Image (cartoon, grey):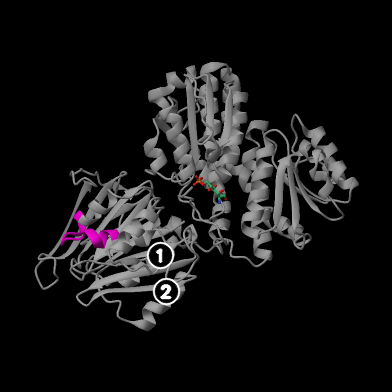
């Protein structure tokens, strides 16, 4: 979703801000803008479309000189994508100074605030909620930007991450957050503030994160803070919106620049698909004790007893993470023999859920910032559940809100279409299920056998990846078809719906996924000659039943693309195209069977000429409801 970058330091800010915005492009946006302060005042530039348009505007217009500024990529919520609606928004103080502000989140009470400010003479240029906040800061500004931001934030309801500048304090950025991520990078003689670590990593790995309702004031400049020659000085301080000082710990960012660069691949999605063997290795590293045949999860050790005694697990997530959570539901019931349900976080939070004693809520999230998932977790916690996180992004809001958790450790995921995070989520949910299973009902031998197979996964995934060209050729044959079905049963039912989601989000082809048996209850009416139907039909308990479903599709002229087990020669009788995966125990199959579907979606999008890493209307991290 929207992205924020701010810079204050010894270098010209504009080009650094544009570079930072480029690093945030993957998050999804429709317009961009920046504001720079200098002794000539604040200069704002905005554009609709790509950051490159803004970059061009900055170069051709000139005047964006200065060493302090804020920038933004906007994903429209209030008002269409347009220059007036793009950030930064500005306000004029009573003393004639300009405030410029960028914002992620939603100001819920913006309507009464807008009226209040209009009555005081502020003239609005946009339809956004954000402009209200810029004008509110200006309204209460009395020569101290930090105080003005604190005062304004005490009046707003909703969620925000903001970065604010004022031409009266040209070496200062004030930033704050509530419910939306914000990180401050501490570089040599400079500060970089951003909504996402990828915009910071080129400058520094030293960061502080803010908690909700916290404000940070970042100053870097000549010691008199006016830039007229004193020695260079940097200082920051953190407070609450009630101006109580708070100490923040400086931590080290976990990833490096290489991980967020393309490294020779055409797209991040392809890179992330291809690096899945390594991602799984990293995820499993140190978590399997061979000698004792047990799972080691340090993040759960403090509450292991409560987890063993738990009566019920609720898994909550959205999108791809929800599909991983569905597999987690199967895993927990199958391996740990504990009742488990996976629910859309957005539904769970509003349906007055009953949380009995001994309930564990697991939030599954790549970003750790998904608004609905966070809210569902908070709801479950308030009702007495133990809160666990299965999260990729270290230090993210969800990871900080949980009682315990297990990180994915699959490295940063830049591609909007989630791939390696899905496999990491399923791997972690498998580990958790075995961790509990061993302490509940599973025999040592069974656990050991699963662990041995888990360790072979990276190599098995590599074997599936080798079929990329073959999959592309098969996709070429049906790339003109606008409706696809994805079907699977048992552990491979969530894989089928994940395959459908992957295809629709990047290729814009309409695709539906469902349990294979459900097809007969309606969707079979869709099948006509040549309609692509993707089946996951690996060897397992429901193999014969899936074969019957394939025959039903073929009888109606459908074109069947089948994910099958290596060595299954019979499958060719039923399939127009076959993608194979190595044989593995059924609970571990999703981590293999999903791979051909990711590759299929990728090639379909490329063949249709779409920008795989910047799919229309999509954001990497959905930080608003
Ligand atoms: O960051 P999260 O895992 O919480 O994100 C959840 C979904 O928004 C995300 O998985 C989304 O569905 C992806 N675009 C799927 O590829």
Outermost residue on the front side: it is: 119
Instruction: Determine whether label 1 and label 2 are within 8 Å by CB.
Output: yes
Say above or below: 170 vs 530.
Answer: below
Residue 170 lies in the magenta stretch: no
Residue shown at 54%/51% (left/top)? 275
Residue shown at 42%/74% (left/top)? 54
Tell me where the magenta segment starts and ends, as one range. Answer: 136-147
Horizontal and vertical percent position of residue 432:
51, 29
**Closer to the camera in the image, 393 or 592:** 393
Q: Is residue 465 visible?
A: no
Q: CA distance from mark 1 to mark 2?
A: 10 Å
Q: Is residue 326 left or right of residue 295?
A: right
Outermost residue on the right side: it is: 555
Q: How many marks?
A: 2
Residue shown at 37%/77% (left/top)? 58
Q: Quadrant of residue 546?
A: top right
Mark 1 / mark 2, whichever is N-terminal: 1
Which residue does the numbered mark 2 point to in the structure image?
54
Q: Nearer the viewer, mark 1 or mark 2?
A: 2
Crowd tier of the residue under label 2, counting other residues whose Cα lies within 10 Å: few below 14, some 14–19, many 20 or above: many
Which residue does the numbered mark 1 point to in the structure image?
21
Question: What secondary structure is the magenta-colored segment mainly?
Answer: helix
């Amino acid at each position: 979703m929207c992205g924020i970058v701010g810079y204050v330091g010894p270098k010209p800010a504009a080009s650094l801000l544009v570079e930072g915005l480029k690093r945030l492009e993957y998050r999804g946006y429709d317009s961009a803008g920046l504001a720079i302060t200098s002794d000539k005042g604040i200069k704002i530039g905005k554009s609709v479309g790509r950051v490159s348009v803004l970059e061009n505007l900055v170069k051709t217009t000139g005047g964006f000189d200065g060493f302090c500024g804020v920038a933004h990529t906007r994903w429209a919520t209030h008002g269409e994508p347009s220059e007036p609606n793009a950030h930064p928004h500005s306000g004029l103080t009573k003393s004639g100074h300009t405030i410029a502000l960028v914002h992620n989140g939603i100001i819920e009470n913006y309507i009464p605030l807008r009226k209040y400010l209009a009555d005081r003479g502020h003239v609005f240029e946009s339809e956004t909620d954000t402009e209200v906040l810029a004008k509110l800061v200006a309204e209460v500004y009395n020569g101290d930007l930090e105080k003005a931001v604190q005062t304004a934030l005490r009046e707003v309801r909703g969620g925000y991450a903001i970065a604010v500048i004022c031409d009266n304090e040209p070496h200062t950025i004030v930033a704050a957050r509530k419910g939306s991520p914000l990180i401050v990078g501490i570089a040599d003689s400079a500060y970089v503030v951003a909504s996402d670590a990828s915009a910071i990593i080129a400058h520094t790995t030293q960061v502080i994160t803010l908690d909700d309702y916290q404000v940070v004031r970042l100053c870097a400049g000549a010691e008199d803070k006016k830039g007229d020659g004193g020695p260079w000085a940097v200082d920051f301080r953190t407070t609450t919106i009630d101006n109580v000082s708070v100490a923040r710990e400086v931590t080290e960012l976990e990833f490096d620049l290489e991980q967020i660069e393309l490294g020779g691949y055409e797209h991040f999605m392809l890179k992330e698909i291809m690096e899945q063997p390594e991602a799984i290795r990293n995820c499993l590293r140190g978590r399997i004790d061979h000698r004792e045949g047990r799972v080691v999860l340090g993040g759960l050790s403090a509450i292991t007893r409560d987890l063993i005694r738990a009566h019920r697990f609720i898994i909550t997530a959205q999108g791809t993470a929800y599909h991983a959570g569905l597999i987690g539901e199967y895993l927990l019931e199958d391996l740990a023999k504990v009742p488990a349900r996976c629910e859309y976080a957005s539904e769970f939070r509003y349906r007055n859920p009953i949380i009995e004693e001994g309930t564990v809520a697991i939030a599954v999230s790549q970003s750790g910032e998904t608004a609905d998932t966070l809210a569902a977790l908070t709801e479950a916690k308030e009702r007495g559940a133990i809160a666990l996180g299965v999260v990729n992004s270290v230090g993210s809001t969800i990871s900080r809100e949980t009682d315990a958790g297990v990180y994915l450790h699959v490295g940063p995921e830049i591609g909007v279409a989630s791939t390696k995070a899905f496999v990491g989520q399923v791997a972690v949910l498998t580990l958790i299920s075995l961790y509990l299973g061993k302490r509940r009902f599973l025999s040592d031998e069974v656990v050991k056998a699963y662990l041995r197979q888990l360790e072979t996964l990276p190599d098995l995934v590599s074997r599936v990846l080798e079929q990329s060209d073959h999959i592309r050729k098969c996709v070429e044959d049906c790339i003109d078809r606008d409706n696809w079905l994805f079907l699977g049963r048992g552990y491979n039912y969530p894989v089928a719906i994940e395959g459908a989601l992957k295809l629709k989000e990047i290729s814009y082809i309409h695709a539906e996924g469902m349990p294979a048996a459900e097809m007969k209850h309606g969707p079979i009416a869709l099948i006509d000659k040549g309609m692509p139907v993707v089946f996951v039909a690996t060897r397992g308990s429901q193999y014969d039943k899936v074969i019957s479903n394939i025959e039903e599709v073929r009888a109606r002229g459908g074109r069947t693309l089948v994910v099958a087990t290596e060595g299954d020669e019979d499958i060719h009788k039923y399939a127009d195209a076959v993608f194979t995966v190595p044989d593995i125990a059924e609970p571990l199959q999703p981590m293999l069977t999903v791979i051909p579907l990711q590759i299929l979606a990728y090639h379909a999008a490329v063949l249709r000429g779409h920008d795989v890493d910047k799919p229309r209307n999509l954001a990497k991290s959905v930080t608003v409801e």
